[in-house]
Image: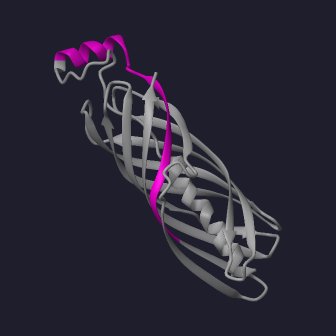
Amino acid sequence: MKNRIISILSLALCAMPIVADAYGAYYNPYGEYDTSYNTQQKNNKLNLGIRFFVGLNTALISHDKTEITYKTAHVSEEQTTTKINYDIFDKAGFVFGVDSSYGFRLSLGAQHYNTETKFVDGSDDEASILALGMVVDIPFVKKETTSPFIRFGINYISVDQNDVKIQFPAYCVGLGVTHNFTKDIFGILTATYAFMSEADISDIKATYKENAFTIGMGLGYRF
């Protein structure tokens, strides 16, 4: 049972970087990529260049480490897992938010899915996972077709697996790059490190802790 709990819960934080992936880019408010200083100053006076966007994100590769400590037995178990996502639409997350011509972006994401784990004894178990997240992207440069940024985020993870229920906040930092295919359509590539403090699992009198590194990608559209 202990190994099953670790196997199920380790899936939760893997979802977080998917939710945390934000979209944005650096663009002229009128849809033209113009590096002219005078034009930029004129446009900034007329329009802050704020636009809404929606998109889908997914994890390509994830590496996570989980630790569960049983209070009554004073026993700890650790597990390290590396996963490659061969189906890019599997567990994809929805993202929406705003970005500006100054390059700063605020994004909100939501993801919910059920997952099934099969064990060596032939049995299986299911878990319901909900992940909500918010991130801020801070650009290194502005008004470029391809632009790098640094990311900070906070997330809420909820896992419901039979007799085990756990909710915890998680935090992430990362680096990413956005490429504008057009003034409206863009893609994104990110590398994110997510971590959490210890969370109590009251149902089994244990604490749970996890951190994860994820490489993800996404596609979005601006309005």
Up the image or down, 122 lies above or below 96; here it is below
Q: What colour scheme has been applied to the protein in the rendered image?
A: one colour
Q: Kindly indicate the quadrant of the structure image that contains residue 163.
A: bottom right
Asked if residue 83 lies left or right of residue 183, the reply is right
Q: Nearer the viewer, residue 204 or 123?
A: 123
Identify the residue at the far front of this view.
Answer: 122
Up the image or down, 139 lies above or below 4; here it is above
Residue at the (45%, 49%) spot, across then down: 152
Residue 96 position in % (x across, y down): 53, 34
Q: Nearer the viewer, residue 43 or 115?
A: 115
Residue 26 position in % (x across, y down): 31, 30
Asked if residue 119 lies left or right of residue 215, the reply is right
Up the image or down, 181 lies above or below 211; here it is above
Residue 1 position in % (x across, y down): 75, 80
Residue 118 position in % (x across, y down): 68, 72
Residue at the (64%, 52%) spot, across then down: 156
Up the image or down, 221 lies above or below 134; here it is above
Q: Nearer the viewer, residue 165 or 85?
A: 85
The magenta span reads: 38-64
Magenta-colored stretch includes residue 86: no
Q: How many marks?
A: 0
